Image (cartoon, rainbow, N blue to C red):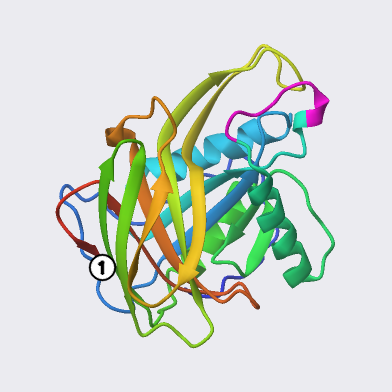
Amino acid sequence: MGVVGLLAASPASVQIEPLSATPTEPVMLRLAEPVAVVELFTSEGCSSCPKADRLLVELAERDDPRLLPLAFHVDYWNRLGWTDPFSDAAYSQRQRAYARTFQSGRVYTPQMIVNGQREFVGSRRHEAQSAIKEALTQSAPAMISLLVTAEEGTATVTYSVEDAPEGTVLNLALVQRHAVQGISRGENAGKTLEHANVVRDFETVATEAGTHTLTIPDGLSLDDITVVAYVQDPETMAMYGAGQADVSTTEANS
């Protein structure tokens, strides 16, 4: 979607302003409707991450269809005494791909990236507010249609994409809406951490219409999952469209 600006941090007391009224019914996004895909790279083994995790929870609670927050739990903190059960080496590799694109060489937690174009420390509320607001002033060409069904531990995603720029790909993220975890070791020992929109499976596919299967973790209720899809340029990491759908027999467009 839109390119966002990197602004200076403000004190943590600054509150994020509402982006829109909370919808009471599912909302169909119009073609080229702006969205903000917010990727947080975090870890339960990092003492600086709980504040960023709480911020992502607040963003998820907006229930704004234009705002798509995602928590990618990296695995490189696991060696320090606590193995994050949501972590995956693939998410660490995704973060390193951003570092190469940004030519920064910086891989750290918590890191927040909005629409694949600007990054900042994930607990900085004012920067998050500014980046999201600017993203929501941009339009984008791609329109995604999704249908998600589930059976025996898998979610089958049927998708089509209109007007995706040449060379882009479609990311599919199976997301756990909410999680609470008690931490017994490591830097956050003794804390109970709350998470929102935790990515539990992630695949990248071509933008041509198709079907793909994602894995639903054991014990996870279908009511607690959704699938987020977003079009991205793998070279520049810019995003050109996004949307989501719950497990349903009704098609959702974005």
Mark 1 crowd level (few <14, some 14–19, many ≥20, 10 Å Cα): some
Instruction: Say whether residue 28 is magenta.
Output: no
Residue 168 lies left or right of residue 223; in this view the side is right
Write the residue at 39% across / 24% down: 219
Residue at 33 percent of width and 74 percent of height: 209
Q: Position of residue 129 (x, y in %)?
A: 53, 55
Q: Is residue 53 left or right of residue 119?
A: left
Which amino acid, mark 1? Leu
Start-end of magenta stretch? 79-86
Q: Is residue 180 above or below residue 225?
A: above
The residue pinned by badge 1 equals: 29
Residue 249 horizontal/vertical position (percent): 15, 51
Q: Residue at x 65, y 41 (%)?
A: 42
The quadrant of the picture occupied by the C terminus is bottom left
Please report the residue visible at 61 percent of the width from the left and 39 percent of the height from the top: 52
Above or below, comparing residue 13 to residue 149 in the picture: above
Residue 27 visible here: yes
